[in-house]
Image (cartoon, coloured by chain):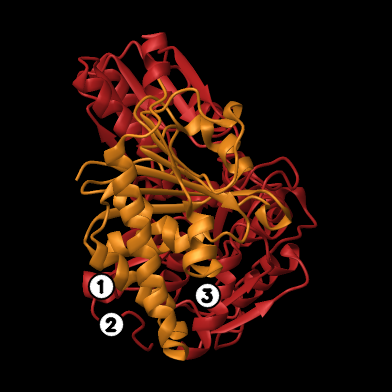
Chain colours: A orange, B red
Amino acid sequence: MSLIRIALAGEGGQGVQAIAEIMAEAAYNQNMQTIYIPNFGLEQRGGVSIAFLQVSDRRIGAPKFNKADVVIALSERAIGRTAGYADENTIFVYDNSYPVPEAEFPKKARKIIGIPAVETANNKLHPRVFNIIIMGAAIGLTKIVSFEAAQEALVHKLGYKFEKDPNLKELNFKALQIGKEMAEASLQEGVEVHA
Amino acid sequence: MQAVIGESKKAFMTGNEIVTWAALAAGAEIMFGYPITPQNEIMHYWTRLAPKYGREFLQTEDEISAGFTVCGAVQAGRKAFTATAGPGNVLMQEPFGMAEAMRLPLVAVIQQRGGPSSGTVVYSQQEVTLTTFGGNGEGHRIVYSTATHQEIFDYVIKGFNSAWKYRFPTFIMGDGYQAKMREPLTIYEPRERGIEMVAPYPLVGKPGHIGENRDPAHLCNIYSLEEELYEVVMRHAADYERIIPEIIEYEEKECDDADIIVVSHGVVSRAADDAVKALRAQGIKAGYFRPITLRPFPQQQLRDAIAKSGAKKMLVAESAYGQLYRLIRQEIYGETIPIEGLFMPGVGIVDYDIITKVKGII
């Protein structure tokens, strides 16, 4: 697999670093070259948190990048903050559970895809698995890891929580599945192509 | 000493975590430190792991004290180290200078952040001048600049051996990106790779009686006579210059016929490597040169690369405003090759930046 670059951005507490780390772990477990680096500014004091993830079958160069293959922005501020990482080859994903002013979107993108992750999490699953829906979407879009490897990495990361509450495992796997399906469907539908 | 790693194995860790495992594997007995981003997790992991292997930790009241406690511990024959960054590196220059003056096998890991002063908590390559020539001394130090997680592990282990073998303070210099990112590597017991760790030994309080059956250790940091200081520094300088060929390390690729040589160090050299490959694929004869040791600097090797390639230009790419550039200029004084800079202080450099710059100047 040639190099895939993903930028995940959200508000502090939305869990973007957690899912980037889980995906990185999953890719590593599949013997891929992987670099994950958080943008470690002052998110805890109210900034946008960005995770940079790269997966390849070959040695990876610089830990950060200027343009991503996939950008996933989970808040209005995150969309503005990450628009610069998109170019004509980028799939730009945002959460369309809330309205976003057109001006916030990147000027260039291969595709701009809206996924109702917050709404789905709140209404169909549980707000706490919001980020897992996003992780499922990222995997559906990039195929950086298999669905099974993603499940394994989830168990590895959250196993101690699953043990306390077995329903959590099912909930997380469901969220992962729904996210993946939403992404795949939106890719096929080819919604909103912005030149 | 108890085996730490056991069978060599693959790992997927942050750079800070690797420093800790490497220091344990190298037989470090105690860490002295004071918290500062982005090296904090070295302390965190060390405090978690050290007790399991009978090692110790002391958090001191500040970085000056952390540096001096390392100076003290190594004199007592303990394999000790510290880690710091940015303003902490500034404060530690006094103990680092003392380690130079007294030839102490001090080991320090530097995870560069943005400056000046507290700057950013993130990343830079702005501690090159400070780490190589900081302090009121002559820069008699060994400074390794790592580029990959494998190198962090390898050079922390090597750093302890260089310090105890040559008795010059030794630095393993990374940065915030290397500290915080996760990347696969292989961790191992040094012995398994045929690396014999130099055993620590006390520098003071040795057996015997001074004047009867042994000479005084005479570890001096204050001199009452100017001439005395002169003699000691000249002796250290001669020792340092003698061991340079043994310590120098560098990486060179595609320089035989290069029209332009791209020089970088540390994490930026990953981008430079990719850039040179991409430029070559486009028919541009670019070469890659990377000093691994910034002190001592592989100046003869760089001069040789310039000579054999007949390159018409050199590009120095760094996440600082010319710190490596100045170091190179002083080291290869007399060379007439024009040197250009791609200076991006405090931010990362990717292959695209270097490719664009090379095309603009060639």
Q: Amino acid at mark 2?
A: Gly
Q: Nearer the viewer, residue B17 or B222?
A: B17
Image coords of residue B173 (percent x, y): 51, 51
- Circle 2 marks a residue in which chain? B
Residue B229 as seen in the image, left or right of residue B78: right
Q: Real-space Cα distance between discs 3 and 1?
A: 19 Å
According to the picture, the residue beneath numbered tag 3 turns out to be B45
The label on residue B9 is 1
Residue B115 as seen in the image, left or right of residue B346: right
Tag nearer the camera, 1 or 2: 1
Q: Tell me, yes or no, if residue B169 can be seen here.
A: no
According to the picture, the residue beneath numbered tag 2 turns out to be B6
Q: Nearer the viewer, residue B339 or B295?
A: B339
Q: Circles 1 and 2: CB distance less than 8 Å? A: yes
Q: Nearer the viewer, residue B136 or B1?
A: B1
Image coords of residue B97 (percent x, y): 67, 54
- Circle 1 marks a residue in which chain? B
Q: Amino acid at mark 1?
A: Lys
**What element does badge 2 sit on?**
loop
